[in-house]
Every structure is written in structure tokens, then in C-alpha cells.
Image: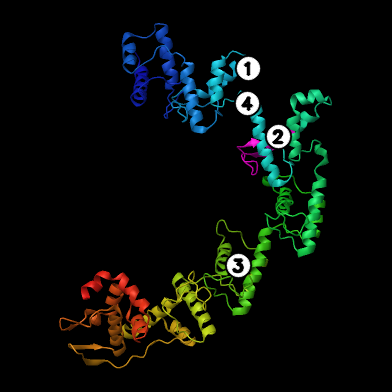
Amino acid sequence: MTDNWYKMYEVAKNYYNKYQNLQIPAKYVTSDGIKIGAWISNQRRNYKNKKLSEEQIKLLNSVGMVWKVEKQTWEEMYELASNYYKHHKNLKINKKFITKNGYDYDENGLRLGIWIIEQRKSFKKNKISKERKEKLDEIKMIWDVNKNSWDKMYELASKYYAKNGNLKIPTHFKTKDGVSYDKNGYNLGLWIGNQRQIFNSSKDIRRRQQKLSPRRIFLLNDIGMIWDASLDCDRRWDRMYKLARNYYYRYKKLDIPVDFKTKNGYTYDKNGEKLGTWIQNQRRAYKARTNPRYAKDVEPLSEQKEIELEKIGMIWNIYDYKWYKNYEIVKNYYINHGNLDVPTNFKTKDGIQFDEEGLNIYNWLSQQRKAIKGSKNVRKLNKQQIDLLNEINMPWVSVNKSEEKWMRFYNLAKEYYQYHHNLDIEGKFITVNGYEYDEKGEKLGRWIRTQREKYKQRQKEDKKQITDEQINLLTQIGMIWQKIERKPKFSTIDTRKGKIEDNIEYQELVAKINLLKIMGLPLIIDGKPNPIIYMSDRELKSKLNINIEDLIYNFYSEEKSEEVAKAIRKQNKTLIKRYK
């Protein structure tokens, strides 16, 4: 025995250890490129011709060698086919399909696809028993593949017609869904051409019907089949053009939504012609003249049709059209505000009023910056577009994120000031446009409070957490850095049950006493003030989720809302129980 034989035996042994058998297809190749299937077949042949030694036979027997391979029984293969049907709900099995369980592909399994083909051949030769045919019928056996194939192609053609309104399909158009081009799909264009060729191949109606039945002719007619291709569907093009012209006369533009259907050209009708789709197809046909990629699934537009469409305001490049339309909106914003410092969430249709359905100017400007840098997946700007943006002082270089965020909130605060003539903003105020509450917007109230805290911190520690420029900008729009003028601090307050001795501001103390009163908590516990009295700003925030400034705002007056106290009570049940 050669070393090579032992090497191949080790591969066979590994296969056996993994699959517990040596039923290896003859063409099976390992991931390393070893043709172990062919080798096993050679060993069977050598065994039959008595060319194997006793040791080789013994070794192969130890790993389950089957010397005589018998064909699987009909019942075993039927069981696999039945499993396939139960799992996939059909018997559309590829001839190369190999399986062990009937529904999952397994290259070490049985050739179910070939078996299905053999059953069809037996049926055509009338060599399959009535009992077996009935069993296969139970799992929806397809006996005539060509008939099934025709129905499948017709289904794709119907979908193409539903989307495009015609069967003017390029010869090389391939598809899987009947709508979009797919190089790995069915050649629908060639199939349509073949139906036309069969129809026109004989003047003898009887001979024609042998190849293309009356039923199939009726079905194709139903989806607009034109048997004489030379007609070129010009009549339909003219009809759609008239509808497009009516639309243009009514609206002075041809900016038609893709899903727009109509019977008269200008009013929507769900049962009408798909004018929006037709306009889109004309753009693709226009591109097909110069771009082979589009020529795969659409006939190029003639120059004469191009001229006719341009007479009614056809827009060939929809991207440029939308760009200039958006630019006009941004330009209006610039004229109205004198700058392009746009809030992040500001949307508009006219550049002036907020509109949830409008253009997000901030995002659009960001796209232009990416375009000038040559970013991927962003179309480059042409010279005219760059010049137009420069005319409205386009900020090509954005500030860093921190400064950008600050300016965004500042612009909202500025809008609030211009509308309300003050910056007396509640802590929970949220806004999109700066002056109206909108829960989808930015937390402007919290931001204003943060600016005051940074200002105070700067006064204490001389750290520039807020810059001189930022202080000046906020001061110019009415910022009150000390929101509440508190009364002088004191040292002692007498009570019925004891004394509170601390350096606490008057308004803070009154607010805390009112809070305790509303929440039903005692002011004095064991001769000492309730611990809430001495809580710092940080402790209040941590334990009661409210800071001193908001505490004074809500509880300095004894008439302030019970609702705030309820919220605090709900969030701090354990703490309240302890203080009671």
C-alpha cells in the first residue's frame, strides 16, 4: 500500500467520524480540494476486480464502507419529496437539489431533484403506476413543467404591465419580481418576443393554436400585448402625452408625484392612468440615450419626443430641480433672518414659518458642506450652485460641535426673546421654533438654567465655563443672571417646638417649609429641624429630583401647586416614610 492510499483513507475516516457513513457522492470534494468521492468509487471498483489487499478491505470495513451501493427505494424518495412539500408548500425542486431530510440542501444526501425529473419522464412514457401518480398528486406534483413555466412568466408580465401600463419590454430585460431589473432573474423580454414570434409564425390559425392556445392569447391580450411590434405603442405614448400636457396647462409645471393617477390629466383618480409613473419612465428613457445601464430595461427616448416633453416643462434632472427648489427656501430664510444660524429641528416650506412637513434647513446645509468636501454618496456641487450659496453667506466651515450646539440653543433663546420680550423661561420649556412649546423640540428652559449655573460658577471659581462673548450675547437679549432676588440671610428663627439655627436664605427656607406642609411632613423631628431643611442643592436634586431654584419657584408662595408635591411624594415614598 502506498502512502497516498493511507492519506486518502484518513480523509475517508474523518468523513465517517463526522457523518457516521461512507455514502459519499462520486463528485464530492472536501474543502481542501480532495476528491474523496471519486476515491471511494475507485475502492469499490478495485474491490469488485479483487485489486484490494485484505488489510485495505479490513481498514475500509472499520469505517463503514458499503461495497455495493443500491438505489434507494421509491418509498424512501417519496418520503423525502413529501417532507419537501410540507416545508415549502410546493414541489418546485431544482434538479441539483440534494438532501437528507427532504427540505434542507445537504451535499451528502440523496438526489431528490433528479428523482423528481425521473418521475416526470416515467409519466410521459406511461410507465408510472396509477397508485404512485395519485400519491405524487397529493403533494402537488407538477407533471408539465413547460405549462407551469408559462404561467410563471405570464405572472411576471402581468406585474410589469401593472407598473408600466404596457408590455414594451426590452429584449434583454431580466427580472425576479416583474418590476425591477435583475441580471439573475427570468428573461421576460425574450419571453415576450417568443410569444410574439409564435403568434406570427404561421398564418394557419390551427397550427398557431397548437403552439399558443386561445386561452393564452386571451390572457396576453388582457395585459396589453401588441402582436405587431412595429406599431411601437406610439398611440399610447400620444395619449399619455396629452394627459401630461393637461397637467402642465393646469399647474404650470410637470412636477408630478410618482403615484399620481388621472383620467383627465389634472385631477387624481385611482382608476385612471398612471401619469406619475409614465413621467418617471420618460426620464429613464431619456437617460438611456447616453447611459447603457438604463438601456437594459427601457427603450431610449427619441429626440422628437424629448422636444415635445420640453415644451410642457419636462424636468429631466429631478435632483437639480429639487436642489434649486430647496435653495429658494434657504434663501428666504437668509433674507428674513440675515444669517444661516438655523436651529437643528427647524423645518419649513417657505423659509419663514415652521412646518413639520417642510425642509430641514440645518440638515440641507450640512449636506452642502459634505458635497463641497467630496464626501462619498453625496453629489458634487457645480459652480453655479457654489456661487448661489456664497451669495447668501453659506457657512462652509461649521463650528465645533460644542459651539454649534450652544449657538443652536442661543438662536432659540433669541427667537423666544423677540417674541416674548424677555427670557423668563420655565425650566421645563421645550420648543422647536423658540417661542412655542413643543414636546418634540429642544429643552430650552433647562439650557437657560444651565447658563445661569455656569455664570455663577465662573463668579465663584473664576473658571471660564461660559465665555465673555456668550455672556454678552445672552445679556443683549435680556438674560437675567440672578433670576430671583433673595432676601438677606439670617441666623435664627423661633418655632413652637424648637429653633432652626443656620445660615439659610429666607426664600429657600420658606419654600422648604411650604414643601413640608404640602407633603404632610413634620417641620421638627425629635426637637430638631426636618433634615430636608438642611439639604443642599445637590442633595435635593439627588433625593427629591428638584434643585433649589425650582424649589423656590414652585413653593415660595404658599398657594403653589399641589401637583409638584405629589410628583415628589410619588418618587420618594421610602424617604417620606422615614421623615414621618
> Residue, x 24% and y 82% (percent of image)?
533
| Mark 3 lies on residue | 358
In front: mark 3 or mark 1?
Answer: 1
Amino acid on which the number 2 mark rests in the picture: Leu
Please indicate whether residue 207 sits to the left or right of residue 415 in the image: right
> Residue, x 45% and y 86% (percent of image)?
479
- Could you classify mark 1 by the number of other residues whose Cα lies within 10 Å: few (under 14), some (14-19), or many (20 or more)? few
| Mark 1 lies on residue | 124
Please indicate whether residue 71 sits to the left or right of residue 542 in the image: right
| Mark 4 lies on residue | 145
Q: Mark 4–mark 1 contact, CB under 8 Å?
A: no
Residue 437 vertical placement versus 255 (above, below)? below
Query: Rounded to the nearest whole Å, what is the CA distance between mark 4 and mark 1?
Result: 12 Å
Q: Sequence order check: which comes first, mark 4 or mark 3?
A: 4
Q: Sequence order check: which comes first, mark 4 or mark 2?
A: 4
- Could you classify mark 3 by the number of other residues whose Cα lies within 10 Å: few (under 14), some (14-19), or many (20 or more)? some
Residue 305 image offset from top left, x and y in percent: 80, 52
Q: Mark 2–mark 3 contact, CB under 8 Å?
A: no
Residue 319 vertical placement versus 159 (above, below)? below
